[in-house]
Image (tube, rainbow, N blue to C red):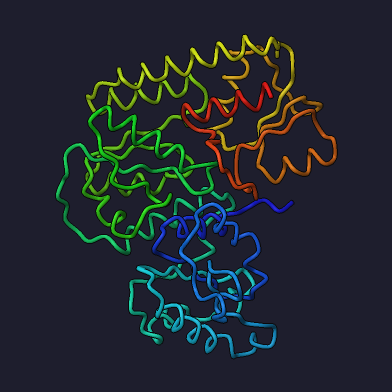
Amino acid sequence: MNRPDGFVGAVMAIEGVVDATAMLHGQNGCRKGLLLSRRMCPRPERDVDLPVYDGVSVVPFSGINQGDYTGRSMGKLVRALDLVSREDYRFIALLCSPGISIVGDDCARALGDCGPRIPSMVIDSSELGEEVWVGFDRAIRSTLEKITSEGKTVRPGTVVVTGLSIMHKDWRTFEEELCDILGDMGLEVICFAGAGCTVDQLIDSVNTEWCIDISPEYSVATRSYYAERGVEVVSAEESPVGFDATESFYRRIAESTGRDCSPALERLRRFRRRAYDCIRATGRDLRGRTFHVSAPESVRAPLTRFLVKSFSMLESDMDYDYLFAEGDRCVTEKASGGCQRCIDVGFPSRKVDFGMNPVLGLHGTMYLLDSLFL
């Protein structure tokens, strides 16, 4: 199984801006793995008969073939850009596939030649890093730098949320939960940068009073940009995974913003009570059962503490009973009989969540418990 890299992360960042699009200069086969974005962040249907879509209405591409590498690739790119720029996107981010990068096409000149009717930029794939979250982070910062203007009008009590992506499992449920929690604190979320936001929301996000971070790996460059623009950053030491980490997350926001988090703590108390009652009802004991977590450190660390502290489970790198991992890995492990139970906690995953199945926050903790005690 190929591990998603920074290139994939950058595409997912742009696809998480619902009226923007990532465009690929490359062959159709290079879109494999990128098309998962339509499962994680559904878009309005496009004219899929256009050659730039080839039947799938996300991540349009230039459609070069092997013969185009000798001098025709630039012309195809310009024609494809002209088609895409006629769509109703508010922003285009152009990326070259690793194969076409060696040809040396001047993508910036191609954007100028086709005269896009909307803002656009070229993302240098060589600067996106090996980790998927690095590519996501750098793409969001580059987009902000391109579309936001200088100057700032602070809107008191407003928030931009960083470090959350469409790659986070059931990110929409967590967004709704967080908006409710922050609303009870008198804070209004203006934008989730790269997770279902619009171009206008990104532009407005520099006027927020606070930047609340969710996953530090996904937001190093982005939260730095907001800090440079005068937005007060509430840094995430780790993601809100499990009851204790979620409580710490609420308290950190309250301490940084001077707001009252008692309604959030009361909600947390109710979730804890229900979890306790349900665990007792199962009559099961997880003490001594082994587990392994494959996830970014900001998820792995609090999830590991939750399992060890709450249930006296044992972390193991081999011969584990429970695997918490990317959805696709869970499928292969289950098929091979690699462990007793596999629990989907991240990207890449081809599963579409109809119910509330995030990993983050209160609903995320209940999803983890539901999976553990199934």
- The picture places residue 153, in percent across and down from the top left corner, at 14, 50
Q: How many labels does the image show?
A: 0
Q: In this view, does 37 lie above or below 300?
A: below
Residue lying at the far left of the rendered structure: 153
- Is residue 15 toward the left or the right of residue 277 in the image? left
Name the residue at 30% across, 17% down.
262
Q: Residue at x 85, y 40 (%)?
A: 336
Between 360 and 162, which is closer to the camera in this rendering? 360
Pick the quarter of the image with the C terminus: top right
Q: Nearer the viewer, residue 253 or 235?
A: 253
Q: In this view, does 124 lie above or below 182?
A: below
Q: Position of residue 335 (x, y in %)?
A: 82, 41
Q: In the image as oriented, which residue stretches furthest toward the right?
A: 336
At a point 69% along the width and 88% down the height, the residue shown is 67
Relative placement, left or right, of 147 versus 131 is: left
The residue lying at 57 percent from left, 49 percent from top is 131
Looking at the image, residue 166 lies above or below residue 74: above
On screen, residue 276 versus residue 160, left or right, reads right
Q: Find residue 46 and report its horizontal and vertical position in percent.
A: 49, 71
Residue 213 against residue 205 in the figure, above or below = above
Quarter of the figure with residue 179: top left
Which of the 4 image quadrants contains residue 91? bottom left
Among the 4 quarters of the image, the one containing residue 18 = bottom left
Where's residue 47, x and y in %? 51, 76
